Structure formats: structure tokens, C-alpha cells
């Protein structure tokens, strides 16, 4: 993710890491590493969220998923603190 942000600093897309709940803390540890806070536009932890596999399974089961926008991910995404 950091490479993508460094190579395309003006890219304006949401970035999400999808991983099992057991890896949640490891994801947050990695995106908040000091080296990733030095990206030109903003720290990686500001641009990248975590989604658990369980959250994705909940999303798939939503009755009107085909009629929603990607902003629905905001309800499930977790930011590093």
C-alpha cells in the first residue's frame, strides 16, 4: 500500500486491508509504523483501513448491496489509532 501511495501520490481512492480478526492488531501495527508516516500526502494510517473477513461476509449478505455505494464500507472499516 505504501508503495502505491508513494508512486501515485495524487491517487484518490480508499485503501483497505482485508484480513482475519486474528491479524487485526498486526495490521494496525504495520500501517502505523514510523516509515509509513512519512508519505508525501498523508500517513498510511490516515489513508488505509482494516476490514475483517467477518465484515465482508456481513456485507455480502446485505439485501440491497447492489444498490449501495462504496461508502457502505465506512460502516465496517476500522482506522488505526
Image (cartoon, rainbow, N blue to C red):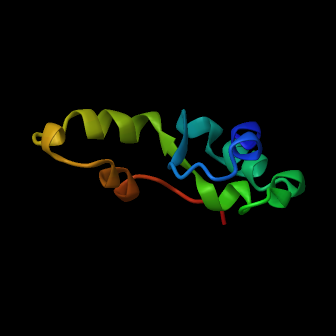
Give left or right: position of 63 versus 39: left
Q: Position of residue 27 (x, y in %)?
A: 68, 43
At horizontal 16% and vertical 37% (from top left) the residue drawn is 66
Outermost residue toward the right in this view:
35
Q: Position of residue 47 (x, y in %)?
A: 61, 56
Give left or right: position of 69 versus 4: left
Between 67 and 75, the residue placed more toward the observer is 67
Outermost residue toward the bottom in this view:
81
Q: Position of residue 37 (x, y in %)?
A: 81, 60
At horizontal 89% and vertical 52% (from top left) the residue drawn is 35
Picture quarter with the C terminus: bottom right
Is 63 rendered above or below residue 42? Answer: above
At horizontal 37% and vertical 50% (from top left) the residue drawn is 73
At horizontal 59% and vertical 48% (from top left) the residue drawn is 11
Count numbered badges in the picture.
0
Q: Position of residue 52 (x, y in %)?
A: 48, 40
Picture quarter with the N terminus: top right
Please identify the quarter of the rendering in which residue 19 is found.
Answer: top right
Give left or right: position of 5 versus 35: left
Is 59 rendered above or below residue 14? Answer: above
Amino acid at each position: 500500500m505504501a508503495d502505491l501511495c508513494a508512486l501515485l501520490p495524487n491517487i484518490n481512492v480508499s485503501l483497505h486491508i482485508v484480513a482475519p480478526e486474528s491479524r487485526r492488531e498486526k495490521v494496525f501495527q504495520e500501517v502505523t509504523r514510523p516509515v509509513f508516516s512519512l508519505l508525501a500526502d498523508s500517513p498510511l494510517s490516515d489513508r488505509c483501513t482494516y476490514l475483517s473477513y467477518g465484515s465482508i461476509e456481513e456485507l455480502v449478505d446485505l439485501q440491497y448491496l447492489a444498490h449501495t455505494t462504496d461508502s457502505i464500507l465506512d460502516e465496517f472499516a476500522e482506522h488505526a489509532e
